[in-house]
Amino acid sequence: MSEQRAPRRRGRPRGGSDSRVRIISAAVDEFGEQGYDGSTIRSIAARADVDSALVHHYFGTKADLFAEAVGIPLRPDVDVPGIIAGPRDDVGARLVRYVLEAFEQPDIRRRGVMLLRTAIGSRATTPLLAGFLSRELIGRIARELGVDDAELRATLVASQIAGLLLTRYVLKLGPMAAASVDDIVTRVGPTVQRYLFE
């Protein structure tokens, strides 16, 4: 005799007032143990002892939950596809400007620098951030490019952007830290453009 299930209720999934906090805590643990790719909404929900629908209700996608759990100040998975899909002549410049203008905002810069420093110095955080960037940034750029070496091109773009952020905002190398956003966009944008399309 098969087990009968209670009918599914419509509307907002039920969860206690501490459910959101438990989900974030479970996500931090799960991402830390399993990495970004090895974690699922279902496994995080099980760890938090909630229904996976409640995780989706509060956070949407896995990328949304990851960004919330680790405090990522930018959402490349949301913003970059639109930049890549725009006019091809200046995609490189627009990508560089997008990142720099975001990091010029004090709150984003503070959180971004903290995340970069943690990722560089922590064996737990490095693969987590790498997994997120591989799936949500590099993978998305590669799909938009649709060429044989798209993943290499997208990884070169990521390396250029990461180096730019490190030298300007973490290491604060004099000329790079002092340069205007427009100057850096003018100089670095063509390199990113070449990685993408040439």
Image (tube, rainbow, N blue to C red):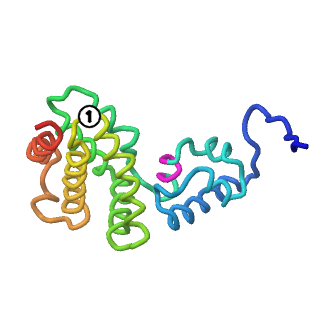
Quarter of the image with the N terminus in it:
top right
Name which quarter of the figure residue 5 lies in: top right
Give whichever of 154, 24 is nearer the camera. 154
Q: Is residue 16 magenta?
A: no
Give whichever of 62, 98 is nearer the camera. 62
Residue at the right extreme of this rendering: 1
Residue for point 24% across, 56% down: 162
Residue occupied by mark 1: 146
Residue at the top extreme of this rendering: 87
- Side of 129 relative to 68 (left or right): left
Give whichever of 172, 34 is nearer the camera. 34
Residue for point 84% across, 35% down: 7
Q: Position of residue 43 (x, y in %)?
A: 62, 56
The tally of labels here is 1
SS label for mark 1: loop
Badge 1: residue crowd in 10 Å (few <14, some 14–19, many ≥20): few
Q: Main secondary structure of the magenta part?
A: helix
Quarter of the image with the C terminus in it:
top left
Amino acid at the residue labelled 1: Gly
Q: Position of residue 188 (x, y in %)?
A: 12, 47
- Side of 131 relative to 32 (left or right): left
Q: Position of residue 175 (x, y in %)?
A: 9, 60
Q: Position of residue 84 (x, y in %)?
A: 27, 34
Vertical relation: 19 (above or below) 145? below
Residue for point 14% across, 57% down: 178
Name which quarter of the figure residue 54 lies in: top right
Residue at the front extreme of this rendering: 1
Please provide the residue range marked out in magenta.
Answer: 63-67
Give whichever of 87, 21 is nearer the camera. 87
